[in-house]
Amino acid sequence: MHKEEQTITEVTVENLVSEVSKMYDEGYRLIQIGCGKYDDIFEINYSFDKDYRFVNLRLKITEGVVVPSITGVYLCAFIYENEIHDLFGVSIKDIAIDFKGNLIKTSIKNPFNTPTVTKVKAARPAKTENAAAAGAKADGKTETKPEAKADAGSKKEEA
Amino acid sequence: MAGRIVVPFGPQHPVLPEPIHLDLVLEDERVVEAIPSIGYVHRGLEKLVEKRDFKDFVYIAERICGICSFTHSVGYCKAIESIMDLQVPERAQYLRTIWSEYSRLHSHLLWLGLYADAMGFENLFMNAWKIRESILDAMEETTGGRVIQGVCKVGGVRRDISDAKLKEMTSKLDSIGGEIEDLCHVFFDDASVKHRSVGVGMLSKEDAHKLGAVGPVAKGSGIALDLRQTGYSAYGSLDFKPIVETGCDCYARCIVRAKELAQSVDLIKQAAANIPAGDIEVKVKGNPDGEYFSRVEQPRGECIHYVKANGSKNILRERVRTPSSANIPPLVKMLEGCQMADVPVIVLSIDPCIGCAER
Amino acid sequence: MGLFSMTKTVLKSLFKKPATIRYPAEPAKRFEGTRGQMEIDIDKCIFCGLCAKHCPADAITVNRNERTWSINRLWCICCNSCAENCNKGGIYQTNVYHPPIVAGETDVDVYKGKPVEEKPAAEETAA
């Protein structure tokens, strides 16, 4: 079975840009930047590829830490950095093309930066209950809304 | 010199199949700068992974895109299988290859049709879609769905194709191959196609590399980047070379896709001839624990499925980087300095799929 | 040469029969494996709710007390997940599409199981 070798190197906020420039000088191509939130730690993955060799740099930060932008090295990173900013609320400074939170238009700010909902129940198809669900949504606090959104708006959160 | 004006383009536009908005800064008829803006169709599918059983998420992964649907499910399953070290049976790998190539055929035919439509060549558009219909029929016959196949599962595939059926499919592909050849000749030779696309939307090899272009955009700019070369599914045992054009313009990207049609037909025939007998799935025991970046080649280019799991039945994080989001920065580069009338053709030449780019 | 590259195709299309069919005068294409709609053999159902739990679209609702199995036809994506997860093999897929649902009609199909003889209490709630 085919399984790629994937190296993951940890970087810090201080040496991120210099490490990324090193990859650039070696001729690597930026594949993606992806973020994930596990407990209180944001994990940002910078993935590179050269001749189908996969290398990943990983940056771990806590809430409130400002990450330097790598758009000075790889311009194409602007789309990923804006996306991370919009979905997770991680602040990234000096993005070459900064959309200032307007790249992904979500009705709730930073929808992915919310605690996970463990149980979700579908809104009953019956019309009366739908109306009730809509009413509950309008009354609900803003914290509960992102989950409903993440579920394509068709489900109601069960507290 | 005239002053600069800004023309909003999209998200609703007759030639755009997808909601992307561009602010075009114009100087007379020339585009000086283009500022893209997406985000109209964000569905939050990645968040949904936290509430679904990892086996059930295949259905959702498949629905990220309506065209590359099958390759999305392959990418997701490959990530889970790599984490769990599952040995997927050879026959399942070959079947995945066959269906992946069928979906490439249908995606490229769809794109060639749309491209002809953007140029105003309606006849060619209908012709491409007529051929696509027979591909979709083959898909429906073998998988049950026309564009959402739903046959890929963690550990294998759901449906098998009998050997008799495979023979029938290959013989049908012979006649479809002839039709595809006729269609491609129009794209290769026709004056009106060349007139609209040669020298339009230039993207040099250096820019394509720097801006992270993938798929036909990279191949059209002379970069031989084809993730199938890494040999996932059954691609390792099939004989093919990535198609590369050096024109760097819309025409080159069009030619790459047209040539990939013939390549896909050839790959399906090879796979059908070499497919081994055996099981089509393995039993999945336990839950995934670990992380993996799975990379597959979709019709639009390289797609990444990153899965991180902690041993429970719900995955912690699934991140999908679709080819379209990687191709937006090159698009901005291509639009600089082009004519206003060429914008639709250039936007279409990256085969934008914004629904997938936002998930 | 470039100008005439379409000629062959045009001539072929002129003399061939049309690629389209005259639906609905002619029936639509349908294959043996086409994903039409989900059906249930309600007598086999034990109302365990596994199908509802594994439904990616949340289209299925199982009510154990009232012994009903209902499916929202507009939400169902015909993925066959319920059939695969059914222990009793009571759910299956047919290649017949559900007729169109017009405004005012209900989109939920409710199937009612036979009341259990041993438990009179269940019968009361069902009635």
Image (cartoon, coloured by chain):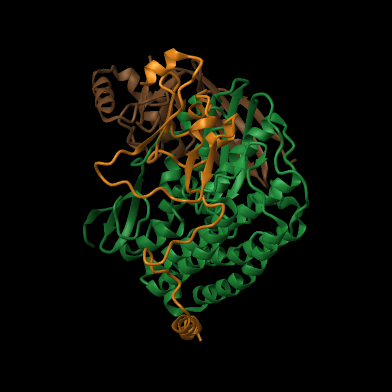
Chain colours: A brown, B green, C orange
Count of number-bearing discs: 0
Along the line of sight, which residue is nearer the eye, A7 or B173? B173
Along the line of sight, which residue is nearer the eye, B116 or C109? C109
B17 vs B350, left or right, is left
Along the line of sight, which residue is nearer the eye, B323 or C64? C64
Residue A139's spot in the image, x, y percent? 24, 18
Residue C45's spot in the image, x, y percent? 52, 29
Residue B180's spot in the image, x, y percent? 56, 71
Residue A85 visible to the viewer:
yes
Query: Residue at coordinates 57% horizontally, 37% vertically from top-left?
Result: B305
Query: Residue at coordinates 41% horizontally, 51% vertically from top-left?
Result: B332
Residue B127's spot in the image, x, y percent? 46, 72
B298 vs C11, left or right, is right
**Quadrant of the image containing the C terminus of chain A:** top left
Asked if A52 appears above or below B107 in the picture, the reply is above
Asked if C106 appears above or below B8 in the picture, the reply is above
Query: Residue at coordinates 34% horizontally, 19% vertically from top-left?
Result: A144
B39 vs B319, left or right, is left
**Quadrant of the image containing the N terminus of chain A:** top right
Residue A64 visible to the viewer:
no
B213 vs C110, left or right, is right
